[in-house]
Amino acid sequence: MAVSESVHGMWSSRLMFILAAAGSAVGLGNIWRFPYLAGENGGGIFVLVYLGCIFVIGIPIMSAEILLGRSGRQSPINTMRELTAMSGANPFWQIVGWMGAIAGFMILSFYAVIAGWAISYIFQMGSGAFTGADAEFANSAFTSFTGNVWSVVGWHGLFMVMTIVIAARGVGKGLEIAVKYLMPALFVLLVVLVIYAAATTGHFMEGVSFLFSLNTEKFSWGAVLTAMGQAFFTLSLGMGAIMAYGAYMPKDASILGTATTIALLDTGVALMSGLVIFPLVFANGLESSAGPGLMFITLPIAFGQMEGGEIFGVIFFLLVTFAAITSSISLVEPAVAWIVEKAKISRAMGAVTVGGFAWLVGLGSAFSTNIWADVTIVGGMTFFYTMDYVSNNIMLPVGGVLIALFAGWILDKKIIEDQMPGRTTMFSLWRFLIRFVAPAAVSLVFVMTFI
Ligand code: PFF
């Protein structure tokens, strides 16, 4: 049966696995994407659908990915190849590994561009440029920064180099050390910011009610698809990142309990980010539905108006950068592990190859706010939006359903028994959700959105 250790290394404890997987999950998706999507889609109802997706679809699929990863103990591509063979299944199922690696590439390519913007904003906030700034100033600062191809590509490159360096150092000396320091730092910074928002804005409860009161007029199947895509994106599901991390997880840790802990941490961070951002937005009479610019235009105006805004603005963008790094290292891991297995090259070479290629593809997104701003790919979307839409709203959910179907119906029962011993109520619930509910729910949302 399955090997007990991965050739790539192992997390030193269950806690380290939780920090690494939570590090993957908590990222731009929580701090940048969740608040602006909630803002655009009217708050409460979107948040409710999102939470429903996390519990009914997200946690079961995350458990399935960990289960598959820990059974195969290799890169997702080779894990899926081996498990398909061991279960006597049709080779079609290997597609899960391949699609995941491609989706990971696509996500990393635009993810690094946004993360680069965030790094630059640490310095822009710190320079005091936004102190007392009005909307016009913040808008033009953002437009001129993202309009400058050299600065965008430079920051994007810097972020990719940081990702490559950590990935190159391997599981124990790179990934584990990064998450061990960055994750606790991230939680502390976030708590500081929530206290700041609660203590100084005077609009904290307005933020709470925006996030939690139901505004049914805003309901649409498109918004449901967005909420579901966001649930996949925020939990890093459907592309093998968690499968890759699961391959390094100690055998004695419980899969269902661990997946639930990670999902709760991730959801907590998303909601807390909303509770930092919306009170600031409302306190300064700004628009909650600003779209992707919410974090880069609206928030700097808010910080610029606030007492101590300069320093808290720096803290905020530092938080975003930490969160992005602990996610990007999980985006490269499936492909790096695969290259190392396949080509028998060093991790350093693997990390440079994967990161370098993702950086090249990312240039398309970096150019989308300047020299390619008028170039549209599908449906009037720029290269950047096309990458975001196709990977999050289509590839991750499709990958997720395939993972659910494989774990629920195809995978050899003996492997499941070995990985999830004991027939608890929690196990029965998982089995029901993974076999029936998750595939049906995702399919329903697709059908309702696209008919
Ligand atoms: N979960 C990350 C976030 O919320 O920012 C993004 C992400 C990381 C998506 C890794 C997918 C992935 F495999």
Image (cartoon, rainbow, N blue to C red):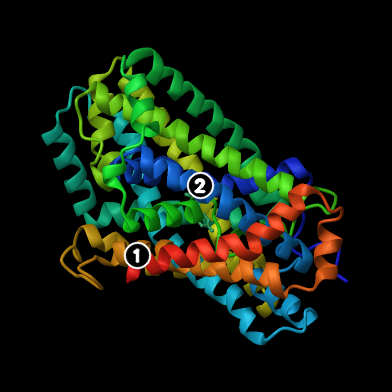
Front position in the image: 427 or 263: 427
Q: Residue at x 23, y 70 (%)?
A: 379
Mark 2 CB within 8 Å of ligand 1? no
Count residues near mark 1 (Cα–Cα under 10 Å), then give few for <14, some for 14-19, many for 20+.
Answer: some
Q: Residue at x 63, y 74 (%)?
A: 339
Q: Residue at x 52, y 44 (%)?
A: 26
Contact (Cβ within 8 Å) of mark 1 with mark 2: no
Q: Find residue 305 and name its label.
A: none
Q: Residue at x 52, y 40 (%)?
A: 267
In the visual, does 299 lie left or right of 212? left
Mark 1 CB within 8 Å of ligand 1? no
User: According to the image, label 1 marks what residue?
Assistant: 449
Labels 1 and 2: the sequence-earlier one: 2
User: In the rendered structure, which amino acid carries the disc numbered 2?
Assistant: Gly
Q: Residue furthest left?
A: 136
- The percent coordinates of residue 366 (x first, y second) are 30, 60
Please say whether residue 222 is visible from this viewpoint.
Answer: yes
In the visual, does 399 lie left or right of 114? right
Which quadrant, please, contains the C terminus? bottom left
Give the secondary structure at mark 2.
helix
Front position in the image: 146 or 33: 33
Count residues near mark 2 (Cα–Cα under 10 Å), then give few for <14, some for 14-19, many for 20+.
Answer: some
- The percent coordinates of residue 263 (x first, y second) are 59, 44
User: According to the image, label 2 marks what residue?
Assistant: 52
User: In the rendered structure, which amino acid carries the disc numbered 1?
Assistant: Thr
Front position in the image: 392 or 138: 392
Which quadrant, please, contains the N terminus? bottom right
Residue 108, located in which quarter of the rendered image?
Answer: bottom left
Q: Give above or below for 51 relative to 79.
A: above
Q: Give above or below for 58 relative to 383.
A: above
